[in-house]
Image (cartoon, helix red, strand yellow):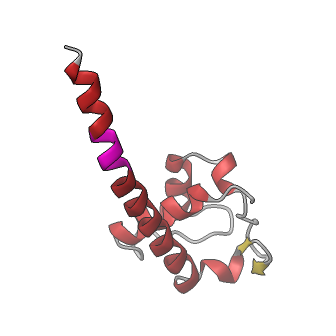
Amino acid sequence: MKLAPALLAVFLLVVSPVSRASSRSKRTHGEQVFNTSGCRQCHTIGNSGGTRGPNLSAIGKTLTVAAIRKQIVYGGKSMPPFGTILDKSDLDALVAYLRSLDGK
């Protein structure tokens, strides 16, 4: 029984760096999607982008993954829906990128 916690710790040490690398790669892809899909035309991140839509620099602190995904897929207010424009992997990456934005 004492072996199980040790095995779990080893598993987490091995898997965690792979997961972080995968997550970082997804966020990088999401940033590319943001820049190439027209998002930057309306939205600002940091000091760059449009002003028609809200500033998204800290969106990851205010909206959940589900809320971010819903806004992208269905649009709303003056934002058009992108659910039929983005494929699943691009959408997942964009959501991961936006969720990582914390204003820093």
Please identify the quarter of the rendering in which residue 11 is found: top left
Please identify the quarter of the rendering in which residue 46 is found: bottom right
Majority secondary structure of magenta residues = helix
Residue 68 in magenta stretch: no
Residue 8, horizontal then vertical, whole percent:
27, 31
Comparing 26 with 94, the one in front is 26
Q: Quadrant of the C terminus?
A: bottom right
Please tell me which residue is depicted at 56% across the width and 55% down the height of the picture: 68
Please tell me which residue is depicted at 29% across the width and 38% down the height of the picture: 10
Q: Is residue 63 left or right of residue 85?
A: right
Q: Is residue 27 left or right of residue 43?
A: left
Please tell me which residue is depicted at 61% across the width and 77% down the height of the picture: 39
Please identify the quarter of the rendering in which residue 90 is found: bottom left
63, above or below 45, in the image: above
The magenta segment is: 11-16
62, above or below 20, in the image: above
Residue 41, horizontal then vertical, whole percent:
68, 83
Q: Quadrant of the N terminus?
A: top left
Residue farthest to the top?
A: 1
Please tell me which residue is depicted at 36% across the width and 54% down the height of the picture: 19
Comparing 21 with 79, the one in front is 21
Comparing 20 with 81, the one in front is 20
Residue 65, horizontal then vertical, whole percent:
51, 49
Residue 73, horizontal then vertical, whole percent:
47, 62
